[in-house]
Image: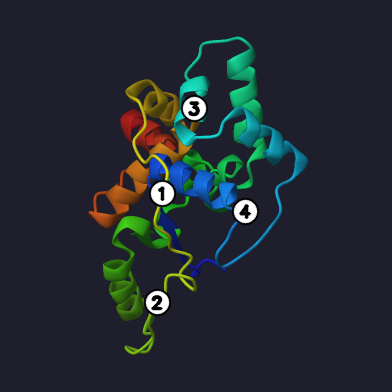
Amino acid sequence: ASDEKAVFALRDPVSRFLSGYYSRFRKGAQRYFREWTERERQSFEWFPTPQALADALAEPSGELRERAEFAMSAIRHLKRRMTLWTGKPAYVRKNIEKVLYVARQETLDEDWERLKELLDLPRDQMLPHDAVRAHRTTYDGELELSEKGVDALRLWYADDYELLEIGEEVRQGRVRPPRSGLKRLASL
């Protein structure tokens, strides 16, 4: 229906990469448990740290780069880009008038309060704060990536970074019209 609106939450892809890597490395524990696939087992054998995987993805070519691409498509939480749920950036832009709100995982508590107002949800409706129920964890591993690793991830998740830009435009109330709309305006 034309009056339907979308709400979605985004997360910085590098942060999401680290979280997804460690979540699958732990096999989803402590809230969930899902054994590695054979492809995940191979990926973690080749890349025992997120730093090793990100740096291999930065290689221009060769066996290490091929293994990194394999791992990025094999590790469950890394292969799914945010565009899987939202559609590609061009699709989101084309349908931007249907986006009611864009939350950020980094500001989810504040965004949840705003969403309760927008959706007229009960004030006492709360997000889970228990670490297990919220699937929150602390990391014993490395959280810093090399500059080349971050650059490689930014390229790998380029569409997700474009989604973040669109999300920020929505959050700040400065949404641009679709590119096709710009062409029509220019021809008038």
Upstream in sequence: badge 1 or badge 2: 2
Q: Which residue is mark 2?
A: 127
Q: Are marks 3 and 4 in contact (CB under 8 Å)?
A: no
Q: Secondary structure at mark 3?
A: helix
Q: Amino acid at mark 2?
A: Leu
Label 3 is placed on what type of residue?
A: Ala
- Extreme front residue here? 140
Q: Nearer the viewer, mark 2 or mark 4?
A: 4
Of badges 1 and 2, nearer the viewer stands 1
Instruction: Name the residue tied to disc 4.
Output: 27
- Point out which mark residue 140 bears: 1
Q: Is residue 82 visible?
A: no
In the rendered view, does 105 fall on the left or right side of 134?
A: left
| Neighbours of disc 1 within 10 Å: few (<14), some (14-19), many (20+) | few
The amino acid at mark 1 is: Asp
> Percent from the top left, x then y, of residue 166?
35, 45
* Closest to the observer, 170 or 103: 103
Q: Earlier in the sequence, mark 2 or mark 3?
A: 3
Q: How is the image coloured?
A: rainbow
